Structure formats: structure tokens, C-alpha cells
Amino acid sequence: MSRQASIPLPGGRAVKRLGYGAMQLAGPGVFGPPRDHEAALAVLRAAVEAGVNHIDTSDFYGPHVTNRLIREALAPYPDDLLIVTKIGALRGDDASWLPAFEPDELARAIDDNLTKLGLETLDVVNLRLMFNARRPAEGSLTAPLKAVADLQRQGLVRHIGLSNVTPTQFEEARGIAKIVCVQNQYNLAHRDDDAFIDTLAAEGVAYVPFFPLGGVSPLQSAALSDVAARLKASPMQVALALLLQRSPNILLFPDTSSVVHLYENLAAASLTLPDDAVAELDVIGR
Ligand SMILES: NC(=O)c1ccc[n+]([C@@H]2O[C@H](COP(=O)([O-])OP(=O)(O)OC[C@H]3O[C@@H](n4cnc5c(N)ncnc54)[C@H](OP(=O)(O)O)[C@@H]3O)[C@@H](O)[C@H]2O)c1
């Protein structure tokens, strides 16, 4: 599969490999309204106008803020737009991230996403595990996943994915529901999931890394800057191109609140890294 190609989902849907993550459109700390409402709408519209057909969000961004922005900017939605959301957490009044895995909490989260996005069915819902909020940690997902599978049977959810999971939890999940994607932290400096990515590729499951650019601590490295200078690209473009080349089941959704950065990131789809550059970059994460 080429780096620009689409990746198919069950049901015949296909998405381009470079999408857009909307989390940081909410206010500082992913809490409250954006600093500039009109600028947030402009980035979302620019993404879709530039051909993006995969947007990642959650109703716990803001909370409610990101979904409302997506609806205001983009509804009625283009037919080919895939909106991926996630459930499993709630925000405290102090902006904290709290686990929310009881069946009634999950049902409410689905309802919140549907209402705020203005949809009758959610395309893809990732169950975001919170045994440890910062990294995958073991613990059974059977009870919450069965609750999400029930909501799928009711027609509220088309496809189910997982986020912040271990390979063991992925195996446990497959006995309960069809899993179409896994969303874990991965980027050129954080490569714990290398073996997991290969397993998922062999199974035809998409791997959709969050923090592809380093998230709150944007990637910085002398080797990255050197490679970028040689290729006349930006470091962020090189970081994205590396992930696209890493495995054909990887889909990306870099997040930005800037139209300039959006276009820069999308251009990474046509950047090819030579083998020696890949070898230099691979050292960073080891
Ligand atoms: N499942 C999970 O647990 C989880 C956790 C976190 C995030 N996510 C999802 O992952 C998506 C991406 O994650 P993320 O937003 O935290 O991290 P990210 O995409 O790795 O990085 C976003 C940061 O990089 C900056 N940036 C983007 N493009 C740039 C460019 N070309 N040059 C310089 N800086 C650039 C952005 O700043 P500017 O706004 O200034 O461009 C922003 O601060 C989110 O939108 C969210 O949907 C999921």
C-alpha cells in the first residue's frame, strides 16, 4: 500500500492515511473554549477542503468543545468524512481526566457524542482505557467492551476501536467485538508498540498513533533536524513521513490549531525518506 493510499474499513469505507486530530482546538489543557473560535473553525474547514476525510475527536475534549466546533464548521458533513471519537473518560471541574467505564457512563458518552456532533450513528468509537491514564496498563476490558458492543447492536456505533491498550487487552477484546483500530501513543521517539504494530498489520487492524508529533512536548532532535534539512522538509514532515513508511496499517491524525501547520503536515504524504534517513531516525527511539 502506498503512503498516500486509503486504508479500508469494514463496510467498504476508506480513509486517506493522513487525517486531522482536533483535540487541541479546545482551550489550554484541552479544557474550555478555544482562544480563537473563528480560527478553530477555519482550521477544520481548511482540513476538509484540503481532502482530509478522517477527523479524530472526543466529547471529553473541552468537554463538548471540540465536537461542537466540528459540527459548527462542517455539518452537514461530507459523505466520505469519517469522524472517530473515544469514550471511557470524563473531565473533572479542575480539568482532570477521570475514568468513566460503567455501562451508564459509556451510554451517556455515546449520547453526548451523538448529540454534540449532530449524528445518529458514530462511525468509529474507541474505548479509551484508563487503568493508567498515561500509558497502557493491564486490566480486564471485558465489562466495558461488552457495554460498547451492546450500543453497537443498538445501531449507535458502526465500528469499535481501542485506545491506550496492551496486546493482551487487544486479544481479550477480539473475543467480544470486532476491533478495527488501535490508538496508542507512538512517534519517532516513543516506540514501545513496534511489535504490536506488526501484529496488528498482520491482522488487518489499523494502528492510529496519538502524539505523532510528540503531543504536548513537540519532537526535537538534532538527527531529525539534520535529516529534514537534507531533504528540504520540516522536522514535523519528516516525523510524519517516517510513521507513514513504518507500516501500511498506520493512519495519522496530527493535530494543529494553525492552517499553515495543517498544510505543512498534509504535504508529508508526498515525502519519501531514503533508507539512510530512516536508519538515522530509527536510532532516536531506541
Ligand atoms: N487516545 C488518546 O489517549 C489520545 C491522547 C492524546 C491525543 N489524542 C488524539 O491525538 C491527536 C493528536 O495528538 P496531539 O494533538 O496531542 O499531538 P500531536 O499531533 O503530536 O502534536 C500537536 C502539537 O504539535 C504542534 N504542531 C502540529 N503541526 C506542527 C507543525 N507542522 N510544526 C510545528 N508544530 C506543529 C501543534 O501546535 P500548533 O497548534 O501550534 O500547530 C500541537 O501543539 C489529538 O488531536 C487527539 O485527537 C488521543
Image (cartoon, rainbow, N blue to C red):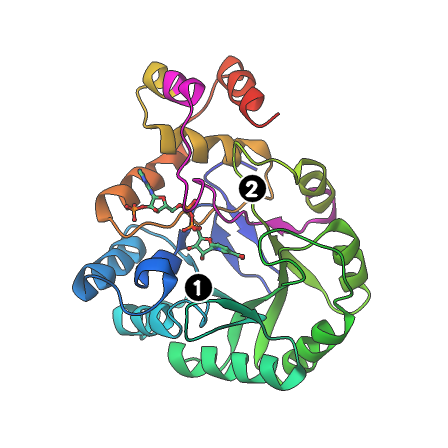
Q: Amino acid at mark 1?
A: Thr
- Label 2 within 8 A of ligand 1 by Cβ: no
Tell me, yes or no, if residue 13 can be seen here: yes
In this rendering, the answer to whether 164 lies above or below 243 is below
* Picture coordinates of residue 21, whole percent (x, y): 41, 55
Task: Write the residue at 74% across / 56% down.
Answer: 170
- Label 1 within 8 A of ligand 1 by Cβ: yes
Q: Nearer the viewer, residue 128 or 230?
A: 128
In the rendered image, which quarter is residue 194 located in? Answer: top right
Task: Write the residue at 23% across / 48% down.
Answer: 259
Task: Write the residue at 71% across / 54% down.
Answer: 137
- In which quadrant will I find the N terminus? top right
Q: Amino acid at mark 2?
A: Tyr
Q: Does the magenta portion include 101? A: no
Give the CA separation, mark 1 to mark 2. 18 Å
What SS does tag 1 mark?
Answer: loop
Sequence-wise first label, 1 or 2:
1
- Relative to 264, 19 lies left or right: right
- The residue singled out by tag 1 in the image is 57
Is the residue under label 2 in contact with that under label 1 (CB below 8 Å)? no
* Picture coordinates of residue 175, whole percent (x, y): 82, 65
Task: Write the residue at 55% across / 70% down.
Answer: 98
- Relative to 241, 199 lies left or right: right
Numbered range of the magenta stretch: 201-227
Tell me, yes or no, if residue 22 can be seen here: no
Neighbor class of circle 1 (other Cα within 10 Å; few <14, some 14-19, many 20+) is many
Q: Which mark is residue 186?
A: 2
In this rendering, the answer to whether 83 lies above or below 269 is below
Neighbor class of circle 2 (other Cα within 10 Å; few <14, some 14-19, many 20+) is many
